[in-house]
Image: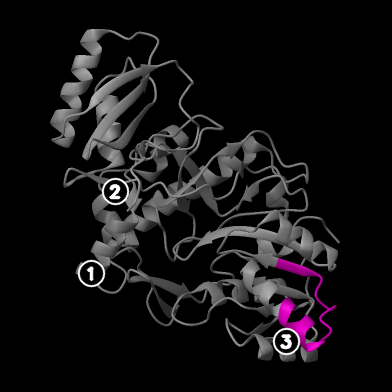
């Protein structure tokens, strides 16, 4: 039996890039012809000219706020998909509300790959504790399990005693759900004296997986892997047995950009995760997830050759309110772009003498008075607020993806 779900996982980097961008050219043209919103936002763009990441980075971002606005103005999906019944078989409603489609396309959310990497195989029974209520999480994993040849128990969340009873009877080999709920089930099984030694494999998501919990599961004989996904995009990245970062899914193009902009950051620098989906039924182009991560150097020791990311490192939306005015990461990015001679910057917000205070810390080898004055003018013009400027050594700002650091204590 192969160590890999398919041969896409072991392509050379050069072959993968060529394949992805050949698919992307078709996807862009398909999105323009089938989805009215993309016909508008990508007007004048020829998919055949988007041949590499530099060209992709010139396309506009699609942010979740825009997605909500479009859906409110044009129900149900804001003109972002052309799929309709009978191919459209589900309409989900996530908090926002944000509506997501499900189609008859097999493994619509591409979860079979993550399940395979976690150790699931055809013929397994999987106890699925992701929600089946309105949001797509339960169906995401179920469709992947079906594609892999596994049966699922659609358990959802809650009722831990009933979960234990059903698992004790069905004897599933695997679990999918949040890590904390797996612990609750196992603790309840211990309390009831029930034998759940059938569990060997778990794929978890939706929350932080503490190393102590992973180790505790390993001591019970349960191998726990995690994956990163969103309701809009499906699978983004997943762990393998190497446990060194998360491997990017083969059905997307992933970028890491500077928060507040669409500009890619150097490898290793923390930034916002931007994903272009190659799913023709929901062709999200440069969808900004609002999540922070970073690219890890080199391929995984497991032999899979796609990009690796560090996993979820926080949220990119650092919008804050200063003296009654909202300040956005996009404004900080605009300030920095006005002065190309400087490096990275970070706007630090504090409270001094009961007043909000803004300090723009700038990486620059030159700390000229004229530059500081020009930066203060840019701050005032672009934010409508006064702020000070401090120059720091190149490379000295933390690599955490922050462009706005609000240090005020919440009372």
Query: Which residue does the numbered mark 2 point to in the structure image?
Result: 42
**Residue 226: % across, % down:** 66, 59
Residues rendered magenta in the picture? 186-202
Which is more foreground, mark 3 or mark 1? Answer: 3
Asked if residue 147 lies left or right of residue 223, the reply is left
From the viewer's perspective, is residue 95 above or below residue 380? below
Which is more foreground, mark 2 or mark 3? Answer: 3
Residue 296 position by quadrant:
top right
Q: Secondary structure at mark 3?
A: helix
Q: Secondary structure at mark 1?
A: helix
**Residue 66: % across, % down:** 27, 57
Query: Which residue does the numbered mark 1 point to in the structure image?
Result: 72
Residue at screen point 24% across, 13% down? 371
Q: Earlier in the sequence, mark 1 or mark 2?
A: 2
Asked if residue 319 lies left or right of residue 12, the reply is left
Residue at screen point 53% across, 72% down? 137
Which is more foreground, mark 1 or mark 2? Answer: 1
Residue closest to the eye, 255 or 34: 255
């Amino acid at each position: 039996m192969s160590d890999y779900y398919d041969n896409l996982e072991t392509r050379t980097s050069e072959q993968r890039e060529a394949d992805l961008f050949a698919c992307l050219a078709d996807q862009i043209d398909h999105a323009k012809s089938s989805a009215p919103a993309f016909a508008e936002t990508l007007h004048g763009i020829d998919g055949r000219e988007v041949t590499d990441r530099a060209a992709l980075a010139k396309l506009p971002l699609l942010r979740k706020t825009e997605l909500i606005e479009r859906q409110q103005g044009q129900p149900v999906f804001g003109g972002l998909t052309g799929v309709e019944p009978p191919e459209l078989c589900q309409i989900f409603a996530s908090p926002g509300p944000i509506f997501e489609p499900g189609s008859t396309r097999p493994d619509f959310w591409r979860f079979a790959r993550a399940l395979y990497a976690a150790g699931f195989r055809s013929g397994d029974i999987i106890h699925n504790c992701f929600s089946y209520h309105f949001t797509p999480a339960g169906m995401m994993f179920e469709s992947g399990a079906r594609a892999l040849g596994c049966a699922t128990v659609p358990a959802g969340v809650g009722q831990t005693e009933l979960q234990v009873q059903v698992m004790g009877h069905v004897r599933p080999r695997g679990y999918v759900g949040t890590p904390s709920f797996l612990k609750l089930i196992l603790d309840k099984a211990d309390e009831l004296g029930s034998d759940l030694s059938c569990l060997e494999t778990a794929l978890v998501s939706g929350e932080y997986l503490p190393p102590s919990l992973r180790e505790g599961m390993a001591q019970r004989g349960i191998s726990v892997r995690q994956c990163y996904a969103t309701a809009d995009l499906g699978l983004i990245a997943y762990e393998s047995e190497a446990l060194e970062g998360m491997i990017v899914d083969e059905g997307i193009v992933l970028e890491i950009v500077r928060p507040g902009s669409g500009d890619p950051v150097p490898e290793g620098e923390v930034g916002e995760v931007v994903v272009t989906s190659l799913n023709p039924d929901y062709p999200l182009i440069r969808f900004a997830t609002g999540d922070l991560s970073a690219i890890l150097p080199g391929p995984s020791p497991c032999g899979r050759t796609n990009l690796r990311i560090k996993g979820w490192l926080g949220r990119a939306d650092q919008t804050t309110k200063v003296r009654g005015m909202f300040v956005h990461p996009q404004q900080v990015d605009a300030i920095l772009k006005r002065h190309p001679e400087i490096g990275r910057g970070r706007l630090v917000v504090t409270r001094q003498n009961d007043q909000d205070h803004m300090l723009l810390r700038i990486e620059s080898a030159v700390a000229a008075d004229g530059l500081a004055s020009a930066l203060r003018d840019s701050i005032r013009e672009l934010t409508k607020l006064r702020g000070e400027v401090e120059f720091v050594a190149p490379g000295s700002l933390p690599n955490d993806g922050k462009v706005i650091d609000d240090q005020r204590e919440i009372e």
